[in-house]
Image: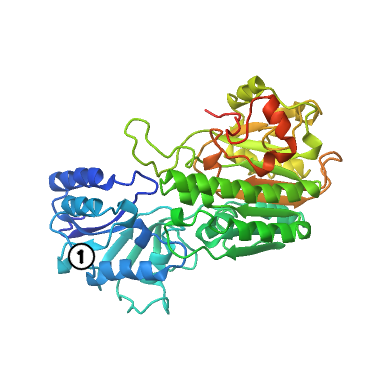
Amino acid sequence: KQEKLDKVYLHLFTDGRDASPKEANKFFGLLEERLSKLYPFARVSSIIGRDFSMDRDQDWEQIEKTYNLFTKGEGKKFNGLIAYLEEQYRAGITDEFIEPAWSGENESRIKEGDAVIFFNFREDSARELTQAFVEDGFDKFPRKKISDLEFVTMTEYEKKFSNLAAFTSSNVASPLSKVLSDNNLKQFHIAETEKYAHVTYFFNGGNEAPFPGEDRLLVESLPGSHYEEHPEMRAEKIADEVESRLKNYDFILVNLANADMVGHSGDFDATRRALEILDFQAGRIVESVLKNDGIVIITGDHGNAEEKRYRITGEKKTKHSVHPVPFFLIGKKFRRKEPRTKEEVMSQYSKVGGVISDVAPTILELMDIPKPPDMTGVSLLGEFYLLFSPVFSFDYLVDYPVCSCLKSVHVKIAIGVLFYFRKRLRGMLGQYFIYFLSDMDNVVRGYFYIRRLSLRHAEHLVDHNLRVGKGVAFASLA
């Protein structure tokens, strides 16, 4: 408007994952009203679900459909945007999977001489589509690169891209991986490809390349995007790899994606099954670590799977929750003489202990490594000074819950992660350490289905009325 443009076209993605599954029509009604009043020169050209346009698992067929919709008009035609959405809803298609459609206005297709602003701010789900538009020698599907196209992204999606970015990435000088590398520690990062960025680019402070001594393994995710049909995902394969490599590294970072990705489906039964599978595979890893005198930390950065229905309407809930998340410290050296009473557990649930940025400093203190000056978080160990007394120490997830809880803040940190490292810790903490972030979506409010982790101490659970299947109460963050 300020530049007196007379033709602006919007190519819209519908969400349905980080928003409710049928919320787009509400927002589009507001959008059309605002455009007509303030920006009459702007019109909606196309609409497509994020499952197509925001793929991050190398499903190039989905990106090709998006690219061809934007540049060739390949898709259904709509006469009215909201009418088309209602038609899709009646067919059982939710926002995430809205089929490609456009207005039929040829002038609205992206072509030579155009300027495009891609205003997604998060990198991982915007890279593939950007790559199709800007990369020379692109070969993922047949396409002719559009010449004289000014393609601007909201943030710097990837350093190799030559396009302009409105906001370049800030430099994180000392991410945890770099600090470990600088201290000559070997580390291993593993996830399935659906979460590749979380154990690489995100976790490493925006650095694409691994640091010296850092190895990576990306296990290929199952084909398709309806993870409710395969709630097992690749958790078993990931657990196998971790168990086989446990003694080879000082630190292991693992992402288990089941709770988050299946939770986003809003399917209660599938999510419950995902939690049972996740519990079993996480249990395998925890037991292996403990057999090697290791230590486990379990935490997360947001909720999801603990709440699958809106309480008032009963509709499916697919987006993240902002509930407090737990922070567990598990190890033989921390075992209590007696399990906590139910009252003590509930007391822990009500306490606030820290925020996500405190996790890395906690790990460094446990490893007796100085925290770099630019790391703004603080170690949580001071919050739980009595933790190191045998009376206040704890061992297994079920019997000895969380020493703290973390404030649920959305930051660029791995979602659903497990870290492991080997080092004599202050002469008392044992030889190994694991930090396990299991996408605590499922655990946040104590509905984590406990089976394998509770077997050795099931009698204590019965004694204290914490029965298997009813989960664990955690310290809470406001």
Res. 347 in view: yes
| Residue annotated with mark 1 | 76
Residue 404, image x, y percentages: 64, 31
- Left or right position of 22 against 323: left
Q: Residue at x 42, y 57 (%)?
A: 226
Q: Determine whether 261 is above or below 470 in the image.
A: below
Q: Which residue is drawn at 23% across and 67% down?
A: 75
Res. 1 in view: no
Residue 333 is drawn in which quadrant? top right
Residue 20, image x, y percentages: 34, 43
The one of 258 and 92 positioned closer to us in this rendering:
92
Q: Residue at x 67, y 44 (%)?
A: 452
Residue 343, image x, y percentages: 64, 20
Residue 175, image x, y percentages: 63, 51
- Left or right position of 407 against 270: right
Q: Determine whether 142 is above or below 367 in the image.
A: below
Name the residue furthest right. Answer: 427
The one of 69 and 220 positioned closer to us in this rendering:
220
Name the residue furthest top. Answer: 343
- Left or right position of 281 against 12: right
Kind of residue at disc 1: Lys
Q: How many marks?
A: 1
Estimate how packed mark 1 is, as few (under 14), some (14 to 19) or many (20 or more) residues with alpha carbons within 10 Å: some
The one of 220 and 266 positioned closer to us in this rendering:
266
Q: How is the image coloured?
A: rainbow
Residue 224 is drawn in which quadrant? bottom left
Q: Determine whether 201 is above or below 462 in the image.
A: below
Label 1, secondary structure: give it. Answer: strand
